[in-house]
Image (tube, helix red, strand yellow):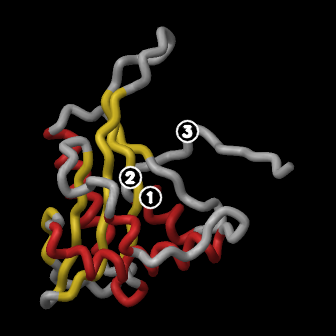
């Protein structure tokens, strides 16, 4: 596995154009895996949800030589106020993508390390995300980074 030297940092509003391009790549994967649920957007519409201003969200980017090659968007969540749920804080990985040319070079794991540091600093007890079951590379990546299957989402089309 060839490694690369990337800079991992918090995203800023000035990153919006590069992030929109990466969102397009992410959406192509979503449409590929579940066309019954996903369509392509213009990419930039995903950036209008307050992710740069909201204290409960963070966005980390991976850059090499000034080019953005990946990102992870996370949300800090508290357990719902339901008596049977422990009052835990967790980090939900909303979106994560590394460009195809940079996969299997440690970029995703470096982004995940930044997420774990952020989570610990904010009192989170665990990370959670979703991955398409057909995305075998994604499943391997998450397992390699300490994730394990806890629950399955099932659905019935009507």
- At a point 30% along the width and 32% down the height, the residue shown is 125
**Front residue of this view, candidates 63 and 35:** 35
Secondary structure category for the residue under label 2: strand
| N-term mark: 2 or 1 | 2
- Measure the C-alpha gap from mark 2 to mark 3: 15 Å
Residue sitting at the far right: 158
Answer left or right for 150 relative to 127.
right
**Front residue of this view, candidates 5 and 121:** 121
Residue 76 appears at what percent x and percent y? Answer: 29, 40
Residue 5 appears at what percent x and percent y? Answer: 16, 82
Which of the 4 image quarters holds residue 150? top right
Q: Is residue 76 visible?
A: yes
Relative to 34, say whether 104 is above or below.
below
- Mark 2–mark 3 CB contact (< 8 Å): no
Residue 93 numbered tag: 2
Residue 58 numbered tag: none
Which of the 4 image quarters holds residue 123? top left
Q: Is residue 106 visible?
A: no
Residue 16 appears at what percent x and percent y? Answer: 24, 74
Secondary structure category for the residue under label 1: helix
Image quarter hosting the N terminus: bottom left
Classed neighbour count for the residue bearing mark 2: other residues with Cα under 10 Å, few (<14), some (14–19), many (≥20): many
Answer left or right for 28 relative to 18.
right
Residue 150 numbered tag: 3
Q: Which residue is mark 1?
A: 142
Classed neighbour count for the residue bearing mark 3: other residues with Cα under 10 Å, few (<14), some (14–19), many (≥20): few
Residue 96 appears at what percent x and percent y? Answer: 38, 65
């Amino acid at each position: 596995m060839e490694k690369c030297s990337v800079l991992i940092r918090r995203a800023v509003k000035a990153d919006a154009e590069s992030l929109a391009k990466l969102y397009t790549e992410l959406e192509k994967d979503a449409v590929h895996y579940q066309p019954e649920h996903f369509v392509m957007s213009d990419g930039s519409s995903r950036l209008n949800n307050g992710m740069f201003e909201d204290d409960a969200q963070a966005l980390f980017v991976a850059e090499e030589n000034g080019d953005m090659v990946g990102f992870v968007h996370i949300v800090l969540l508290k357990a719902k106020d339901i008596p049977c749920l422990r009052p835990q804080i967790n980090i939900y990985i909303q979106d994560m993508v590394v460009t195809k040319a940079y996969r299997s070079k440690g970029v995703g794991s470096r982004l995940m390390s930044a997420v774990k540091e952020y989570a610990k600093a904010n009192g989170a007890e665990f990370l959670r995300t979703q991955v398409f079951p057909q995305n075998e590379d994604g499943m391997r990546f998450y397992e390699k980074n300490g994730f394990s299957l806890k629950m399955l989402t099932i659905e019935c089309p009507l």
